[in-house]
Image (spheres, grey):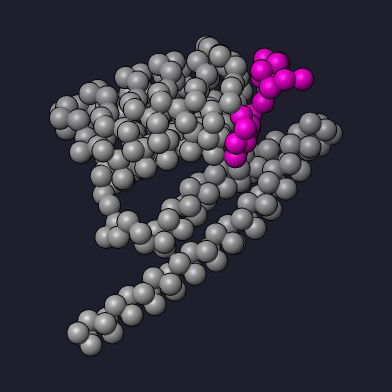
Amino acid sequence: MHLAQALQILKKLVFLSLKNCINLRDLPRRIELESLQILILSGCSKLRKFPEIKGYMKHLSELFLDGMAIEELPSSIEYATGLVLLNLTNCKELKGLPGGICNLASLETLLLSDCSKLESLPQNFGKLKRLRKLHAARTPLRGLPDSFAKTWSGGKLENTTNKRPDSERDGSLGAVLDYMRFRIEMESIFRLFLHEEGLVQGCHSDPKLLTSIDYHKRDLSTSLETAKWQLEDFERAVSLSAATDKSRMREDVIS
């Protein structure tokens, strides 16, 4: 069965990860997955289009599109009315965001760092009242739209728009960013796992639910192993950076 056909019939699907499917080039033109809660397309570097959303996907809370080759999001993204987290990190071809994204009333976290062609945000960006995290480092963005201060009435906003590290070549920065992105995905899987564990208490004989829980257990186990070597990479990068700094200090003293 092709992916397009599968997505037409899996109406009760709650979690879908196609992470790092580097040969994936196409998805169905439209998706209608009313039960889907988490969708991960991270690292699908040849995928240029995200499908139109048919109907309301009110249960979709976390959408990971980081590392995709998309140039734009469909205007129908606004039908993902329950979206809390949208990760577009490292979408190098992304040139803009649709105005409809500002209708996502539940959106709390928007990750746009390393979108090197993203030059502006929608003018009605201030409608995102629940937005608490906006990460947009290393983008051409010069700041928030002028209208933002006039229309936004939310609380504290963690905004990293156009912030850059002291050294773009600092390997420790890349290592920590990789770990942070991976941790977000791991937390999403864990929350879904806890949700299903709660459901199974009253439905011991449901084989589909038990199979799903086993799958998430394996996924979490793999994720923990990955997190372990990512932290080791970070430790090595920090040690190398510290050694480089000491070497420069000695050179400065000698000179």
Q: Is residue 93 left or right of residue 126?
A: right
Q: Is residue 34 left or right of residue 250?
A: right
- Location of residue 74 by image quarter: top left
Residue 110 among those drawn in magenta: no
Image location of residue 199, percent across then percent down = 70, 36
Q: Which residues are magenta?
A: 1-24
Horizontal and vertical percent position of residue 245: 32, 75
Which of 178 and 189 lies nearest the eye of the viewer? 178
Q: Nearer the viewer, residue 199 or 241?
A: 241
Q: Is residue 1 left or right of residue 173?
A: right
Give the residue displayed 60% in from the left and 39% down from the top: 20
Relative vertical location of residue 204 with respect to residue 165 in this rendering, above or below: above
Identify the image quadrant of the N terminus. Answer: top right
Say if residue 178 shows up in the picture.
yes
119 vs 11: above or below: below
Whether residue 15 is in magenta: the answer is yes
Residue 56 in view (yes/no)? no
Q: Nearer the viewer, residue 195 or 97?
A: 97
Q: Nearer the viewer, residue 170 or 60?
A: 170
| Residue 229: x %, y % from top left | 59, 62
Quadrant housing residue 147:
top left
Q: Residue at x 52, y 19 (%)?
A: 51
Farthest bottom residue? 254
| Displayed quadrant of residue 255 | bottom left
Residue 81 in the image: above or below residue 178:
above
